Amino acid sequence: NAGVTQTPKFQVLKTGQSMTLQCAQDMNHNSMYWYRQDPGMGLRLIYYSASEGTTDKGEVPNGYNVSRLNKREFSLRLESAAPSQTSVYFCASTRDGNIQYFGAGTRLSVL
Amino acid sequence: GENVEQHPSTLSVQEGDSAVIKCTYSDSASNYFPWYKQELGKGPQLIIDIRSNVGEKKDQRIAVTLNKTAKHFSLHITETQPEDSAVYFCAASTNDYKLSFGAGTTVTVRA
């Protein structure tokens, strides 16, 4: 049982480049989330999708876009990467809206 | 929105001693309080949670207490072991499918 799978695990970008972080879950969960984790700041919500076909902004959405491709997949796109977006990105999913299951993370550096 | 504060930011304990991490929250409507453990290089994993209709919950060496009047909740780890070394996050949620996380506590268990 894979749970939540994130790709890639590591990525280095130059300022201005674009990229998409992929997330897929095989637990038939309805809701999915994207967080960023920075030292001393915990996990901050970027975007979430409460159900297939819906997306909403979280605490720090600027500079990001998301797509809920289907029930399994939720992608995060950086259109023009900036050094401030250097972070570790986590995808999570939940069936019941409370207990969230996290992926292993994507470590992104923007130079 | 919800604001969750977590203390201390770092905690060093001797193996076999107890560890206590405290969190406060601001939104009196919050009714779900999970604790996550994050090991190095991995995503956070739920270790215990408590709902607002319960004052205390135990699971082997881990316990969580909730004081709704004071709006604070705590994680207690007894008989600490080296494998308890990790970063611990508290979180709070209302019924809106979103979690607000504390900044995290790095726990080190000294042998």
Image (cartoon, rainbow, N blue to C red):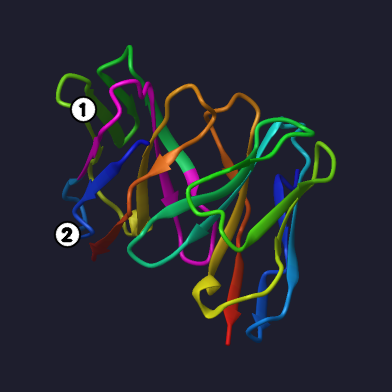
Q: Nearer the viewer, residue A86 or B16?
A: A86
Chain to which the residue tagged by mark 2 belongs: B
Left-right relation of B71 to A9: left
- Which residues make up the magenta segment? B21-45
Callout 2 amino acid: Gln
Q: Determine crowd level at label 1: few under 14, some 14-19, many 20+ residues with C-alpha closer than 10 A.
A: some
Residue drawn at x 73%, y 34% as measured from the top left:
A54
Q: Residue at x 67, y 77 (%)?
A: A11
Sequence-first tag of 1 and 2: 2
Q: Nearer the viewer, residue B93 or A1?
A: B93
| Image height of A20 relative to B56, above or below | below
Image x and y of residue B66, in percent = 24, 25
Residue B14: mark: 2
Above or below, comparing residue B94 to residue A66 in the picture: above
Q: Secondary structure at mark 2?
A: strand
Task: Name the element at disc 1.
Answer: loop
Residue B30 in which image quadrant: top left
Query: What is the chain letter for disc 1?
Result: B
User: Which amino acid lies under the numbered mark 1 shown in the image of this protein?
Assistant: Lys
Q: Quadrant of the N terminus of chain A?
A: top right
Residue B26 sits inside the magenta stretch: yes
The correct choice, above or below, for B44 with respect to B54 in the image is: below
Q: Residue placed at 56% from the left, 37% from the top?
A: A100
Residue A56 position within the rendered picture, expressed as x and y whole percent measured from the top left = 63, 39
Q: Measure the alpha-carbon separation of dots 1 and 2.
A: 29 Å
Q: Which residue is mark 1?
A: B71
Q: Nearer the viewer, mark 1 or mark 2?
A: 1
Q: Residue A47: x, y in percent? A: 60, 47
Is there CB contact under 8 Å for labels 1 and 2?
no
